Image (cartoon, grey):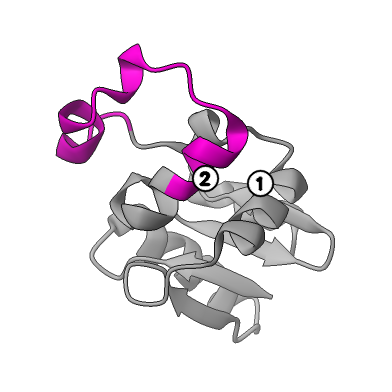
Amino acid sequence: MKIYHNPRCRKSRETLQLIQNAGIEPEIIEYLKETPSVDDLDAILKKLKLEPQDVMRKGEAVYKELKLKEKDLTRQQALKIMIENPKLIERPIVVKGRKAILGRPPENVNELL
């Protein structure tokens, strides 16, 4: 099990705690420091069954600065922007095998436990 984690995010910390309380020590990937590749993020989104725009943090300053709301991005363009600006990636994302969930709310992780 992997968690794409931001230790400064309360929801991310709560999701990690739920996993650890279940007796699992996941691989913790601090995605702001260890940003996934475009291919890795694409694979994660396919497991989530979501499009890049579905997991973009629209409240981030960079989202507004890049005027992403006004752009009609292709999947590849959106993935590239998210990798270049990892703050745009919603968190936490938990991956287990062929499944993934978005830990918002943290209780969503129970699907994978």
Is residue 71 inside the magenta stretch?
A: yes
Q: Are marks 1 and 2 in contact (CB under 8 Å)?
A: yes
Q: Secondary structure at mark 1?
A: helix
Question: Magenta segment range?
Answer: 58-80
| Three-letter code, disc 2 | Leu
Q: Is residue 90 visible?
A: no
- Between 12 and 90, which is closer to the camera in this rendering? 90
| Residue hosting label 1 | 45
Q: Secondary structure at mark 2?
A: helix
Going from N to C along the chain, the mark reached first, 1 or 2, is 1
Q: Position of residue 86 (x, y in %)?
A: 35, 56
Q: Is residue 106 visible?
A: yes
- Between 81 and 63, which is closer to the camera in this rendering? 81
Q: Quadrant of the N terminus?
A: bottom right
Residue 11: image tag:
none
| Three-letter code, disc 1 | Leu
Q: Position of residue 61 (x, y in %)?
A: 15, 36
- Between 44 and 101, which is closer to the camera in this rendering? 44
Q: Quadrant of the C terminus?
A: bottom right
Q: In the displayed structure, does residue 59 sit left or right of residue 103? A: left
Q: Residue at x 23, y 65 (%)?
A: 8
Residue 79: image tag:
2
Main secondary structure found in the magenta portion = helix
Residue 80 against residue 97 in the figure, above or below: above
| Residue density around tag 2, few if under 14, some if 14–19, many if 20 or more, within 10 Å | many
Q: Residue 58 is drawn in which quadrant?
A: top left
Q: Residue at x 66, y 46 (%)?
A: 45
